[in-house]
Image (tube, rainbow, N blue to C red):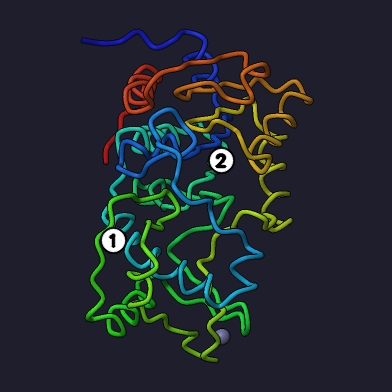
Amino acid sequence: MTLAVDSELHELVHAGRVVVLSGAGLSTESGIPDYRGPSGASRRHAPMTYQAFVGSPEARHRYWARSYLGWRQIARARPNAGHRAVTALQDRGLLDGIITQNVDGLHQAAGARDVIELHGGLDLVVCLSCGLRETRTSIDERLRAANAGFVAAFAHINPDGDVDLSDEQLDGFVPVGCRYCSSDLVKPDVVFFGENVPRPRVDACYSLVEAAAALLVLGSSLTVMSGYRFVLRADKLGIPVGIVTLGPTRGDAKAGVRLDAPLGTVLPELARAVGAVASR
Ligand SMILES: [Zn+2]
């Protein structure tokens, strides 16, 4: 059965020069929960802030223990039909850019190019003392070597890759430091709560949005200003905004096209309707 793609959405994308802004809702069908969207249970512990992470060795120990386990889930996640459809739209030449709030790398895994990771990516870690960057795969190998005996049961995975653990379980975890300077101020290269997106990255996104014919929000409730500001900018400049997301979003009043529907269904339909066939 073929679903009729909303004609306004079709028109918006078919005209091209679209900038995509994607959020956690695009990755839920890949098994990464969206803790703000309708399908995501609220996380049991508040996300760690940048200030807490930098201010306390205990906080870093807790973060890395959870993150070490959560990484297994993130590393296993594969792009879904929604990611592949976005790549197909890009291959068809209809997109001027892809901005994602996600840190899971799934757009790139689906073959998308020139993706701006607004909040960074979990595939790199950075030493806050000396600036050395190391791949997540590399630090994970070192963590595994240091934690051969660390076994902990965990049930709840959050989108940033951390999990819930009791204090007793945490005690058994051995963190590792920077490969170069041994500092324990090693942090995933993602923007934490309480931390600003680097200005040049924000400016690059504004430039894309300002030159676009339309802004298409996919799977974001636009709760955080770091993404919502691009909707505000588009609206101010009279650039049409489309939003396809399950559940209400903060940008609904600004959206000329608004679909409350699952992305894994809508996006492949949309791609076919505009003649872009997902090949991956
Ligand atoms: Zn270092």
Q: Residue at x 43, y 64 (%)?
A: 123
Q: Quadrant of residue 170?
A: bottom left
Q: Residues within 10 Å of mark 1 (few under 14, many from 20)?
A: few
Q: Which is nearer the eye, 133 or 113?
A: 133
- The label shown at residue 166 is none
Ranked by sequence position, the earlier of labels 1 and 2 is 1
Residue at image position (28%, 78%) is: 144
Q: Which residue is mark 2?
A: 97
Considering the image in quadrants, where does the C terminus appear? top left
Residue projecting furthest to the right: 236
Q: Position of residue 131 (x, y in %)?
A: 61, 80
Instruction: Tell me where residue 235 appears, x and y as whole percent.
Output: 73, 23
Q: Amino acid at mark 1?
A: Arg
Residue at the extreme bottom of the image, as rendered: 181
Q: Quadrant of ligand 1?
A: bottom right
Q: Is mark 2 within 8 Å of ligand 1?
A: no
What whole-number distance in Å separates the C-alpha atoms at marks 1 and 2? 30 Å
Does dot 2 land on a helix, a strand or a loop?
strand
Q: Is residue 222 left or right of residue 268?
A: right
SS state under label 1? helix
Relative to 76, say whether 272 is above or below.
above
Where does residue 39 sit, x and y in percent of width and height? 38, 30
The location of residue 32, given as percent across then percent down, is: 35, 44
| Residue mark closest to the camera, 1 vs 2 | 1
Q: Which mark is residue 72?
A: 1
Lateral position of residue 21 relative to residue 266, left or right? right
Amino acid, disc 2:
Gly
* Residue found at x 39% / y 68%: 167
